[in-house]
Image (spheres, helix red, strand yellow):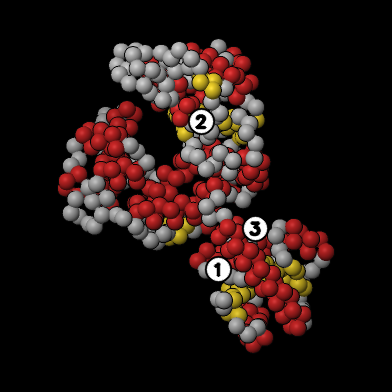
Amino acid sequence: MHEQSLLIIDDEEDMLEGLKRVLSYELAGVEVVTDANPLHALELIRTQRFDLILLDIRMPQKNGMDLLVDIRLLDPHVTLIMMTAYGNIETAVESIRRGAYDFVTKPFEIADLVRVIKKGLERNQLIRENLNLRAKIGQDSALQHFVGETPPMRRLYETIQTLARTDYTVLIRGQSGTGKELVARALHSLSIRGARPLLAVNCPAIPEHLLESELFGHRKGAFTGADTDHVGLFEEANGSSLLLDEIGDLPVNLQTKLLRVLQEQELRPLGGIKNKKIDVRILASTNQNLERRIAERKFRQDLFYRLNVVTVQTPALSEIREDIPLLVDHLNRKFAGELGIPIKRFSMNALEELKQRQWPGNVRELQNVVRRILLFCQDEVVQSTHLHGLEHPGMDGRLAAGHFENEPTGVEPYIQARDRLLEGFTREYVQNLLGLSSGNITRAAQLAGLSRVAMQKILRRTGIDPAVYQHQKEPLP
């Protein structure tokens, strides 16, 4: 068992010294750490795990009740005991409502304080052991890929677990970048069909003339070029689940055939002469307003009702802002591992700024921001001042300086400025990727979240030669 640790946060230096001396003696095997600056203590909590925190309520730098909330965002499971010279029942109830374990009033008897702290440490040990056990049991669970503790995320977890036990068709709705595919995979993985692979098709990604064959299959000779039989995704997914990603973009003529397959649970491949019975659970996702598409006659109303048996709504990042520190920590560790570099620390002011942003691209946009910061930030600690220049490297004003002198008005035309800055960003971004991947185009594309084809197009357009970077450093694992 690791040595337990206690952090005391109080602006009275004399009290801190006295408590540290007494508690170090009374609590054998417990490391006692003190800090008179609550803002510094927050940074300390980011880098070190404490088993219990003894926190004063009234401090000049930051109110202890607000600090309690900040601490629980950094470590939701830490045990907190509040102390104050101004004890009253309202303050006690409010601190416990915000997540404190207990409440002590100054001046206190040392024996009473030691008894409360020992109880808190015992509680913390039970909680940590429980969390470790749950982590071992659930390490292969589909829900391990989700990050978030806010009420909307908890409701999402409950909905997934409930619907996974059924065989209903599910329509997953939400903005782009909110994890709709992740929800679909969790629904399938936790279901009785989870032993078989989930099949998925991105409806707008496949040309319309090929999509029908991809979904329903074809027989040899069904059309020019059909030299062999082809098993469609519906038939391949028999006994499993099929995700129809971005169903709102499915062509109307295929909507009709899809509706018939859903109603009858059988299909006929192109060129086939008889129907085949199938057993497929349908999961569909969309970021579009299907009701509007129906009004515009671009989506069949009867298909909508067939798909919309039950709905899962994925929350936008703006709805779960308090989860952003948890998401940043998760992405920081994930991408640092991919890049083979140390993780960075995000200061409280940087996290607060990220929490206040609008995030139209949701978690996908946050992923890109964290990835760029890891790629381009040279400092160990990311401050809010870093964010402006590092989200879009090469576009922070330094690159643009000195480019307006030849313009009569002193202002460069918008199109010209935009193209120049984007080109500069693209070149610097790709050069950094190639340096990290030792010129490996496939690895560079993976790091950027692009396809290899897209990366090759960028290289051709910019004239960057990957071979230049092949011997600059060891390849990433």
Callout count: 3
Classify 187 as above or below 297. below
Mark 3, other Cα within 10 Å: few <14 / some 14–19 / many ≥20: some
Marks 1 and 2 sit apart, C-alpha to C-alpha, by 48 Å
Residue 102: give its label: none
Q: Which mark is residue 238?
A: 2
Q: Which mark is residue 69?
A: 3
Who's the residue at 47% across and 34% down the image?
199
Residue placed most toward the observer, 439 or 187: 187
Mark toward the start of the polypeptide (3 vs 1): 1
Q: Gap in Å between the C-alphas at discs 3 and 1?
A: 16 Å
Quick one: label 1 or label 2, which is nearer the N terminus? 1
Q: How far apart are marks 2 and 3 (CA)?
A: 49 Å
Q: Which of marks 1 and 2 is in front?
A: 2
303 lies above or below 475: above
Q: Residue type at mark 2?
A: Asn
Horizontal arrangement in the rendering, residue 460 relative to residue 161 (left or right): left
Q: Where is residue 400 in the image (x, y as percent from the top left)?
A: 30, 40
Q: Is residue 167 above or below residue 401?
A: above
User: Could one spot residue 90 in this view of the protein?
Assistant: yes
Q: How crowded is mark 2: few (under 14 residues within 10 Å), some or many (20 or more)?
A: some
Checking the image for residue 49, the label placed there is 1
- Between circles 3 and 1, the one closer to the viewer is 1
